[in-house]
Amino acid sequence: MRILVTGATGTVGRNIVEQLIAFDPAAEVRALTRNPDAGLPAGVEIAVGDLSDPETLTDAFKDVDAVHLINFAGEQYGALPDPAAIVALAEQAGVRRATVLGGIATGPLEQALSASSIDTTYLQPVEFMSNALMWWAAPIKADSRIREPFGDRLSAMVHPVDIGAVAARVLLDGGQDEQSLVITGPEVLTMQDKVRLIGEAIGREVEYVELTVDEARDKWRSEGMHDGLIGFLIEALGNTPVEGRTVSDTVERLVGRAPLGFAQWARENADAFK
């Protein structure tokens, strides 16, 4: 079985590649990347191409049985210019199965997949544990202090390994056609819980300072965020949907083990906060 992973050098894509190898060493894994020198595990075939340019994908889809797709292109997460062409290439190549990261039924890529002969599963991971690296590594290193709003916000945040594991099982096994799979961690945590667990992992206390919405808006603007992103964060963090704060059984049901917790993730990444 040959499986193509797009976005293979990203947080999720890299974990999908690694989990495919772990679950089925006989599977032939092909990674789509714009960088031919991308550091991927030994034995992974590199396909150079770009989702924003479907003409570069013909060779990538050759002899592929299943594909993991992302519904954006480039580092700025721009819209795919021609998702229908991507799906047409996949279908012509004989692709039978697909997963889509964060797919929504109304999206153009998703609509093209739904109208095709390709069995498609939509992966809906909640807040990534790895976001803590992007947001918190620098301030914790600087003064062991986190300044964020919404201290009581609940999150069933997910380990990237578990996203990769669910995707890998679907790509290998199928059986989830047209389903949306919410992927969560094993517990619901507050902001204070997460800060405390990072402190335990690095061996020193980390202080949490709760900001008002206006203070957070000013802080993020001073850090160079544009108003559109700030508005998205305030809405997403201040009004976390039920799915984002409810533990699902997806990992246990499809992978056969409990999802990995934030304490483990913090221990694995402790050096980044020291």
Image (spheres, grey):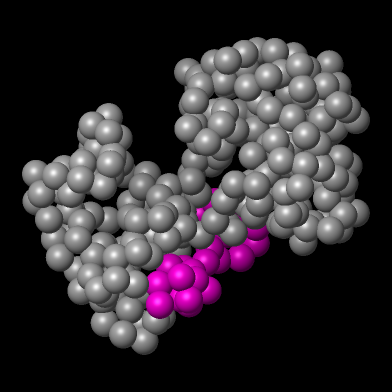
**Left or right of 141: which side holds 19?**
right
Q: Is residue 256 left or right of residue 263?
A: right
**Residue 167: image x %, image y %?**
65, 46
Q: Is residue 177 magenta?
A: no
Instruction: Locate residue 23, reporting x and y percent.
Output: 77, 58
Locate the N terminus and report the quarter of the image it occupies: top right
| Residue 255 occupies quadrant | bottom right
Q: Which residue occupies 36% across, 52% down?
A: 246
Instruction: Look at 17% across and 53% down and name the residue there.
Output: 149
Drawn side of residue 140 relative to residue 176, left or right:
left
Using the rendered image of the protein, determine whether residue 44 is visible from the camera's viewpoint. yes
So how many labels did they put on this image?
A: 0
Residue 203 placement (x, y as % from top left):
36, 86
Q: Is residue 268 magenta?
A: yes
* Residue 66 appearing in the image: no
Give the vertical position of 140 relative to 69 (above or below): below
The one of 88 and 211 positioned closer to us in this rendering: 211
Residue 152 relative to residue 169: left or right: left
Place of residue 5 in the rendered image (x, y in percent of width and height, measured from the top left)? 72, 40
Secondary structure character of the magenta stretch overall: helix
Q: Residue at x 19, y 68 (%)?
A: 208
Q: Quadrant of the image for the C terminus? A: bottom left
> Farthest bottom residue?
203
Please determine whether, in this image, residue 104 is positioned above or below residue 209. Answer: above
Magenta residues span: 249-274
Q: Nearer the viewer, residue 269 or 139?
A: 139
Instruction: Residue at 26% x, 82% y: name it.
Output: 205
